[in-house]
Amino acid sequence: MRRALWIASAVVALLFATQLSRVWFQIRDQSNVDEAHPADVILILGAAEYNGRPSPVLKARLDHGLELYRHGLAPLILTTGGAGGDPMFTEGGVGRAYLTKQGVPAESIIVEMEGETTMHSTAASVEIMKRMGLKSCIVVSDGYHIFRAKRMLESRGVKVFGSPRSSPGKATWREWWLYLRQAFGYMLWTMGITI
């Protein structure tokens, strides 16, 4: 009996590791592909903000979204992200303020400022898009984040093009770790478990 249980556990662990590895490679491959294509809106996923200023990661995402906007790939930008513990500012609001300072008209920026997780931000963004009749988006984030965000948006009926922000160069061990975290998060999401 113990041996059968051990074998069954080993088989389940092997299947899980195989699937995790497959998703890891999909995330890695997607992280290097820029699918920027004309769409209804550029959706910029939030990242940390520091007392009303975008963190370097958020700034890089905003700058990339701004570049896509200036190339005329979408008439609107949707910034996302909640407060993350900040009583004064939200990631989405900081994103909007930054973009308006760069010359984007305020009426061209939509803000989602409730999302505390990727799943929450993508779900809220899709609701906003549906209310506005927007059916497609270019999702902007870090490369390791694009695969999971795309799948979450697509599962809600949105046509999605991924466009990762520029990365500092060759992948590091930290980036491989982020791929693994995203793979694990994606697998949990497909099983209905949100993190």
Image (spheres, grey):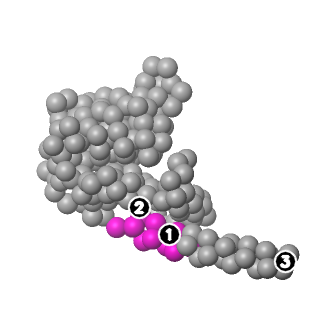
Q: Position of residue 33 (x, y in %)?
A: 34, 67
Q: Position of residue 86 (x, y in %)?
A: 51, 24
Residue type, mark 1 in image = Val
Q: Give above or below for 107 relative to 170.
A: above
Nearer-the-camera pick, 184 or 31: 184
Q: Is residue 193 left or right of residue 136?
A: right
Q: Are marks 2 and 1 in contact (CB under 8 Å)?
A: yes
Dot 3 or dot 1: first in sequence order is 3
Magenta stretch holds residue 30: yes
Q: Give above or below for 69 relative to 19.
A: above
Q: Quadrant of residue 32?
A: bottom left
Q: Position of residue 144 (x, y in %)?
A: 46, 59
Residue type, mark 2 in image = Phe
Dot 3 or dot 2: first in sequence order is 3
Q: CA distance from mark 2 to mark 1?
A: 9 Å
Secondary structure at numbered mark 1? helix
Q: Which segment did they paint magenta? A: 21-33
Which residue in the structure is indicated by mark 3?
1
